[in-house]
Amino acid sequence: MKGFFKTNTFKIMLIIVMVLLIIIIYTAAAGGSFLSDTLGFVTTPMQKVSVAAADSASEFLNLDALSAEELKAMVEQLSSENSEYRRMLVDYYDKEQENEQLRALLEIQDENKDAQYVPASVIQRDPSDVFYGFAIDKGSLAGVNVGDPVIVSQGLVGVVTEVYATTSMVTSLYSEEVKVASISKELDESGVISSNIYTVANGTLRMNYLKSDTKIHEGSIITTSGAGGNFPKDLVIGYVLSVEQSENDISKYATIQPYADIKNAKDVFVMVGFPGKDAEGPDINIENPVTDEDAEAQK
Amino acid sequence: MDLNKLMRYLAYTLEIFIFFMLQQTPGLFPEIFGARPILLIPVAIMIAMFEPQIPAVAFGVFSGIMMDFGFGGILGIHALILTFLCYAVSTISRTVLRVNLGTAIITAIWTTAIVILLGWFFQYFLKGYTAPLYALTSRYFSRFCYTVLLSPIIFLINKGVLGLMRAPE
């Protein structure tokens, strides 16, 4: 054992551990790093190919309801048509995706005319993240910043928490770190949207700090209130499934079913600019998330 | 460095990139109890079973850095964990363990358990999230089982790589 400390293996291990500790300390202090940017440049194109291949395979597997004969006939027919359409299909998938993105963007822009959007695709979903965070294929080079809301045509899905040159990490609404000032416009009652491991399991969110005599009821539509300036107002979040008594105080909370499919979002939009952005006031703070006590005190 | 060794190392590098893409691709692996497998853990461990300590550690660091990059946040935590685990696995495999499918599965079980437990500790427990024990038993345990379940396939792939590019000394 004594001789081990004099071996080259030990010296190399020591160097590796020291370098890793420096990387850990540096990235913990500085956030994004040169190494992350470099890995992003390398992995983003590969990941796009991988996502496209997975989507194609998924479409192919949806054909499993057909019989072998039907599939054979279909293959023969498609083979004969293949050469004719090959030239036309060269850019088909790109254009189709672009078309879908633009159509969804148009719908969203009708609702938020003064906002600026960056369309992006989900390229990674890390299996280690229990809150369904994901990575998108747009980063600082496309104008994305930390704190930008991420939406789909059905509503809010998350917020950008890390930005590299060509990619960004998005923390989903399911994360315990995301708290969103929300409102029922119909009843003019506000609360704070949050989540935890229990609600994630059910695919729901929780709207806390409702009054004990709240009028919010099953089916009420919940949107962002715009307070604090981190999110634009009137972004749809979800609808109320139930209203129940809070475990800790006399307030009530509502269980919210998000409209957006947060776990399976593929094409998203990053809101890089909107009226009222960065106005004063509490809404969401990823670095120092609003605690339940803070939110209660603000209320 | 002989050509076979160089080819083998290139194959390992490619393997890590491919399995990183597979594990990160949305919708590719179906979720089981809300979990998807972390393929880079068994990849690094299986490489370590067949290689001497230094290359084993190098590929462990590479796999760990990729895992940290995929998760976002602090780079290097998984790399550090895999550094020690790959060194231990390589040493054990070259001294006391006969490398076969059975020992590979046993090794995958204890190493995956350590990585996932430490991941839970650093990325969930220390952040003060709600109900850490519930998260451990409901989410992290299913992820552990799913990952271990796929480790024999990764062992066979690595054995195949070795077979094609000659076993190390």
Image (tube, coloured by chain):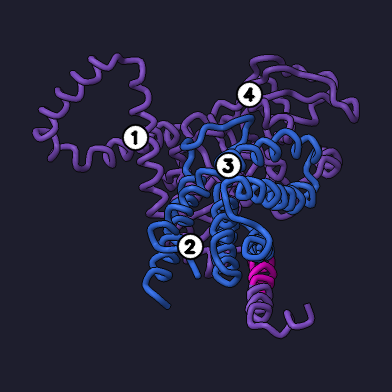
Q: Which residues are magenta?
A: A20-30
Give yes or no for residue B31 being in the magenta stretch: no
Q: Name the amino acid, label 4.
A: Gln
A205 is higher (above) or lower (below) than A161: above
Between the residue at mark 4 and the residue at mark 1, the CA separation in whole angstroms equals 29 Å
Task: Check chain identity for marks 2 and 3: say if they share one.
Answer: no
> What colour is chain B?
blue
Residue at point 54%, 59% (across, down): B47
Q: Main secondary structure of the magenta part?
A: helix
Q: Quadrant of residue A258?
A: top right
Provide residue A132's location: percent of width, then percent of height. Answer: 60, 39
| Residue A56: image tag | 1
Residue A257 circle label:
4
Instruction: State the separation of the CA atoms marked 2 and 4.
Output: 36 Å
Q: Label 2: which residue? A: A39
Residue A27 magenta: yes
Q: Chain of mark 3?
A: B
Q: Residue at x 90, y 30 (%)?
A: A248
Residue B37 is tagged as 3
Give the residue type at disc 3.
Pro
* In this view, the mark in front (4 or 1): 1
Mark 2 element type: helix
Residue found 55% across the figure and 47% down from its top: B39
Q: Report in which chain the residue with disc 2 lies.
A: A
Chain containing the residue with disc 1: A
Q: CA distance from mark 4 to mark 3?
A: 27 Å
In the rendered view of the protein, which quadrant contains the N terminus of chain A? bottom right
Dot 2 or dot 4, earlier in sequence: 2
Residue type, label 2:
Leu
